[in-house]
Amino acid sequence: MAKRGKTGLVKKILFVFFWLLIWQIASMAVGSELLLPSPWQTLQAFGGLMMQQSFYFDVGWSMARILGGFIFGAVTGMLLGLIGSRWTWVKDLCGPILALAKSVPVASFIILAVLWMRSALVPVFIGFLIVWPIVQENTTAGIASIPRDLLEMAQVYQFGPLKTFRAITLPHVLPYLHGAAKSAIGLGFKSAVAAEVITRPVYAMGSRLYESKLYLEVPELFAWTMVILLLSVGTEKMYGFWVSHTAWAKRGLLTGGIHERNGSV
Amino acid sequence: MEFMNVTAAYDQKEVLSDFSLQIKQGQITALLGPSGSGKTTVLRLFAGLLKPKSGHVVRPEKCAVVFQEDRLLPYATLRENWALVTSDQQWMEKTAALLGLGDWMDQLISTFSGGMKRRAALGRALCFPSDVFLLDEPLTGIDPVQKQQLLQVLQTAFTGKTVLWITHDAREALAIAQQIIVVGGSPMQIRAQREICPDSLSFQQEQDALRWIDQALAN
């Protein structure tokens, strides 16, 4: 098993090197740093960025906005998902807004949001708008997956609402929320940075992306893109690491195994 | 516990029609009948999980139920499953020992075999502070040797309690019940009923009782 894991890692590293090589060859073929900088030039630009104090402010503020939007969207989605499962009119009421949030291009919302609020808040709002529908729909699906038999058992044994939520609802919603979180983190990053590019707050990774493009500092543009990519993947990995060490994961509550094992219920 | 002229239906199909039944307090009553005759409907009505179309159901405020399915939380340990119905740790330990689950208290239910899950479901009912027990085929899936042991354990545990024991196994009913009600037909009707004393049943009496049950089921 460990051997297979090691081979997998070596394979992954080799694939990354393969694409870096393609990038290097392409950049040599283009022959212009302004059009396509090489991986080494990008790395140099990245080193240069890390030497500036403002880099950390940009990263810090952007992360705060992204996480703010994520948390705000996740909490709203979970609450509305729970309430909507109890009172269907709430679910129906949210339906058109959710459909709108899912189908209207993010850029339209960003431009509208610029008219409504301070530029620094727009990325938070956009992150919220992307995360909320994903979490609400998954919460609703998780609640719908609860076997009726278990709810009857809870009724007979007089669990009450809190015990029913803790013992039955939460464990059934968790695998769905876990799936939602995994896709929402990446999407939240993408959309919030896109909002920063358009609204350009003082300290923001998106603002630096825009400036790099404006002043034709293409290696910096690539370096910032790399930073955003690393932060997005890093956040996903950190979430995955944290979640895999929780008691829920150890009980197979996050893998969907709960539904397979419920066969007899 | 009592049904007075109860009519119950799923969708349009009537399972009980103008049905009356009385379960004696402090006794084990076996409701014996073929599969699909509507015995589980009786349990659901007494448990308050189904409302009658007409008639009146006198039901307990609180009752422990063993469903036909285990209805345990597979992602929780046996202790956690039982702790949802009682906070008495000593009682839980004692019940686990009685049911042969003493070493399994902190194991996840998902690791249990079918027979162990059945005993765990029975244990949950025994842990619930109630004087009324509704049991739907409680010993299904348990091997014959353990079944005999469990029947003895449960007979002691249910002393003085009001128990409705649903089964289609005539020998099981004879081994534990003080009153046997044989049901059948569609809608369900009482075919025969009689009181017995399971402790002092001779071989001949058991054979007679089995013949009586066969006849009642055949009618």
Image (cartoon, coloured by chain):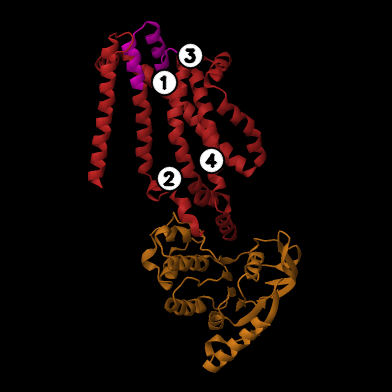
Q: Is residue B172 left or right of residue A3?
A: right
Chain under callout 2: A
Tell me, yes or no, whether the two marked residues, 4 and 3, touch with CB atoms within 8 Å. Answer: no
Chain under callout 4: A
Q: Which sits earlier in the primary sequence, circle 2 or circle 4?
A: 4
Q: Amino acid at mark 1?
A: Ser
- The relative height of residue B77 versus residue A52 in the rendered view (above or below) is below
Tell me, yes or no, whether the two marked residues, 2 and 4, touch with CB atoms within 8 Å. Answer: no
Q: Which residues are magenta?
A: A198-227
Residue found at x 45% / y 40%: A178
Q: Residue furthest top?
A: A215
Marker disc for residue A254: 2
| Residue behind mark 1 | A62
Q: Colour of chain B?
A: orange
Residue B3 percent location from the top left of the image: 72, 71
Q: Mark 4 and mark 1: span between their CA atoms?
A: 27 Å
Residue B202 percent location from the top left of the image: 53, 93
Q: Amino acid at mark 3?
A: Ile
Q: Which sits earlier in the primary sequence, circle 4 or circle 3?
A: 4
In the rendered image, residues at marks 2 and 4 fall on the same chain: yes
Q: Amino acid at mark 4?
A: Thr
In the rendered image, residues at marks 4 and 1 fall on the same chain: yes
- The relative height of residue A211 versus residue B167 in the rendered view (above or below) is above
Q: Which sits earlier in the primary sequence, circle 4 or circle 1?
A: 1
Q: Mark 4 and mark 3: span between their CA atoms?
A: 32 Å
